[in-house]
Image (cartoon, rainbow, N blue to C red):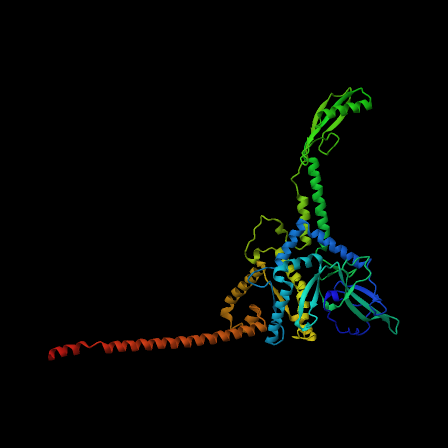
Amino acid sequence: MDIFGFEIKRKKDQQPKGAVVAPAVDDGSTLIASNTAAYYGATLDLEGTIKTENDLIRRYRQIAQYSDCDGAIEDIVNEAITANSDESPIDIVLDDVELSEGIKNKIRDEFENVLKLYRFGSKGHDMFRSWYVDGRLYYHVLLDNNNPKKGIAEVRYIDPRKIRKIKNVTKKKNDKGVEVVVNVEEYYVYHDKGINENTTQGVKLSLDSVVYAPSGLVDANTTMMLGHLHKAIKPVNQLKMIEDALVIYRVSRAPERRVFYVDVGNLPKMKAEQYVNDIMNKFRNKIVYDATTGEIRDDKKHLSMMEDFWMPRREGGKGTEITTLPGGQGLGDIADINYFQTKLYQALNVPVSRLQPSQGFSLGRSSEITRDEIKFNKFIERLRKRFSVLFSETLKLQLVLKGIINLEDWNAIEQDVRFDYQEDNNFAELRDTDIMMNRLNVLQQLDAYVGKYYSQEYVRRFILKQSDEEIKDIDKQIDDEREMMLKDAEFQAQHDATRRGQTQDQEDQEDQEQPDDSEQGEQQWVV
């Protein structure tokens, strides 16, 4: 285990409460039943589940390289992860977490460190694509052995074909003779050459030393973790087959071919065939140019699907005749190709309208948005929530290692921690804008009845749909703004009064400096 760095050990699992006959398997881990809790007593069913998972991962990666499937995957990844040079692609939201503001700021800082560990700004697109294609994501956590309190030093990607999560279940018969679960040991098994049917051992890793982000899709029969591309396997295979068949048909039926009916008279069969071959060799192109080697070679022994047909004809019928066979009809019809492309996009929950590149993007009202785009936006939101397990688990380890928060407190606030992704799908924003406009229109019509038939609280709760927290925050903001406006008004009034006083003093000073006309005339008369 030293080759994997520092290992975080978990406290001994508590015994299950009550008589439990089967453990919960909801993360795609391999279930092992054992009568003892010893590590060397556990055996892996490598002929069943483990082998099938590796085969599925290889199949997922193969179909992801297909052009049409790759285009659909890129649409999904681009909508889920939006890269912007000015903002972080994902932020943590702690509004509903009941902690002090100082602890919240520390959690935000550590989340920024987690994003730097994953280099999510530059590798976020590739990480999400790998998680979507493989259906799972594994990262090994490395710490500083000399000072683990510094937190996570590095995270390294692990190929999902080389690691597997194991649940070793220890059962024991109770006094009634029923086998119940007495202990569940969870760990990871890693093998550098891959876990397959020939693997019998591997390196055992603790739960806290690996960050595991599953897809959330579990096969109910085998408890095997499936990928989001699982339902696209059949449409991709059908689309590839129909495209290959269409190409073969066009190559073989596109050109027109000639049919030579050669009169062989009363010649015997052997001589008739020889005569036809002699005539055919005279009309065939024997010498061809090889563009790869620059040589001229004789290809008269090579046949192809596009060559002419030579048919013998007996005496008594028509003479030698040459006719033509028409080429294939309707070679421009690709309705079957479009049908299977549509099935592929539907299997991946991508709107079919994105298949037509000629259709431009329209920023219209929400009433103009198709239902497929709204469903696609909700699908992206579900994918983001499942992918956020990667950040949640890593952030938990970082906070516990640095002593910012303990494990019990994290379990209490984990459901309140949310992750906000950058939005690139403008349909949600347009929808929210239209909803707000409709509410404001209703509010404008009810304004004359507020205070008579409707109260302000009723309007805010049932018309504007404001929650208690929103009402409290908005009232506080209104009071702060009103107080700020009063201060600004007082400052402006004092400023105006000061300016008026300065102006009056200046006028009085000018009056004193300028002599009166009556006094000046009186002085002249005296002179």
The tally of labels here is: 0
The quadrant of the rendering that contains the N terminus is: bottom right
Could you say which quadrant of the image residue 317 lies in? top right
Q: Position of residue 413 (x, y in %)?
A: 66, 73
The quadrant of the rendering that contains the C terminus is: bottom left
Which residue sits at x=35%, y=77%? 498
Q: Which of 497 and 127 is in front in this view?
A: 127
Could you say which quadrant of the image residue 303 lies in? top right
Residue reaching furthest front?
146
Q: Where is residue 261 in the image (x, y as percent from the top left)?
A: 74, 24
Relative to 133, say whether 178 is above or below: below
Relative to 62, say whether 140 is above or below: below
Q: Can residue 257 be seen in this view?
A: no
Left or right: residue 456 compared with residue 74: left
Which residue sits at x=58%, y=56%? 369
Residue reaching furthest bottom?
526
Could you say which quadrant of the image residue 271 lies in? top right
Q: Nearer the viewer, residue 319 or 393?
A: 393
Q: Position of residue 477 (x, y in %)?
A: 52, 73
Left or right: residue 130 compared with residue 41: left
Q: Position of residue 2 (x, y in %)?
A: 75, 67
Q: Can residue 145 be seen in this view?
A: yes
